[in-house]
Image: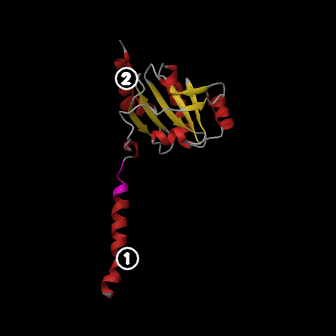
């Protein structure tokens, strides 16, 4: 009996080590989402500018990227110039300012330019929670009917856009054409 008790800590350590070792090889960009294929959640939240209340109805009608961001997010700062360039090329991007101070968000958008055609203010994170957001940046691909078609976790840089995401967005645009 004593020998078994002596081996218990070693056994627990080995089990934990196997799980941690496996985690080293998981791709954080491939986090599963239960929301794929489901409608974008209903919401009623103010815009970052505070000039109107936005709802799910505001995102319907055309394919869009919905980018979850925050001023507290270092990776979002890296991604932001790329989003600006994509917006200049005609990619439709809506933003969800996630768990952030609105004054900081306004300053950020004034200082670094605003790629978002809609800026949704999610101060307490309820919309993010309903979307299954793990953190920021995360980007959702929404079709013209408001269905979440895909999700990307991580920084969108030029290479990621060109090699992984541009074709997904273009497919949504092509589907929406009459």
Q: Residue 80 in the image: x percent, y percent?
A: 54, 33
Q: Residue 78 in the image: x percent, y percent?
A: 54, 37
Tell me how far mark 1 sits from mark 2, CA to CA.
53 Å
Query: Can you see residue 19?
Result: yes
Can you tell which quarter of the image residue 112 is in?
top right
Residue at numbered disc 1: 9
Mark 2, residues whose alpha carbon is within 10 Å: few (<14), some, or many (≥20)? Answer: some
Residue at numbered disc 2: 172
Q: Which residues are magenta?
A: 22-26
Dominant secondary structure (helix, strand or loop) of the stretch shown in magenta: loop
Can you tell which quarter of the image residue 20 is in?
bottom left
Name the residue at the top extreme.
Answer: 178
Seen at 37% across and 55% down, the residue is 23
Seen at 35% across and 75% down, the residue is 10
Name the residue at the bottom extreme.
Answer: 2
Q: Identify the element where label 1 is drawn.
A: helix
């Amino acid at each position: 009996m004593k020998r078994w008790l002596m081996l218990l800590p070693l056994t627990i350590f080995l089990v934990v080590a196997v799980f941690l070792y496996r985690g080293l090889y998981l791709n954080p960009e491939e986090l599963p989402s239960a929301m794929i294929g489901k409608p974008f959640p209903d919401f009623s939240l103010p815009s970052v500018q505070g000039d109107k209340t936005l709802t799910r109805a505001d995102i319907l009608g055309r394919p869009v990227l919905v980018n979850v961001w925050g001023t507290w997010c270092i990776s979002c700062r890296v991604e932001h110039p790329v989003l600006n360039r994509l917006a200049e090329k005609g990619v439709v991007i809506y933003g969800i300012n996630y768990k952030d101070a609105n004054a900081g968000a306004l300053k950020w958008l004034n200082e670094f330019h605003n790629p978002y055609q809609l800026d949704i203010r999610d101060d307490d994170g309820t919309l993010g929670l309903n979307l299954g957001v793990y953190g920021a940046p995360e980007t959702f691909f929404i079709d013209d009917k408001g269905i979440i078609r895909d999700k990307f976790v991580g920084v969108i840089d030029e290479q990621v856009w060109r090699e992984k995401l541009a074709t997904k967005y273009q497919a949504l645009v092509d589907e929406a054409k009459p």
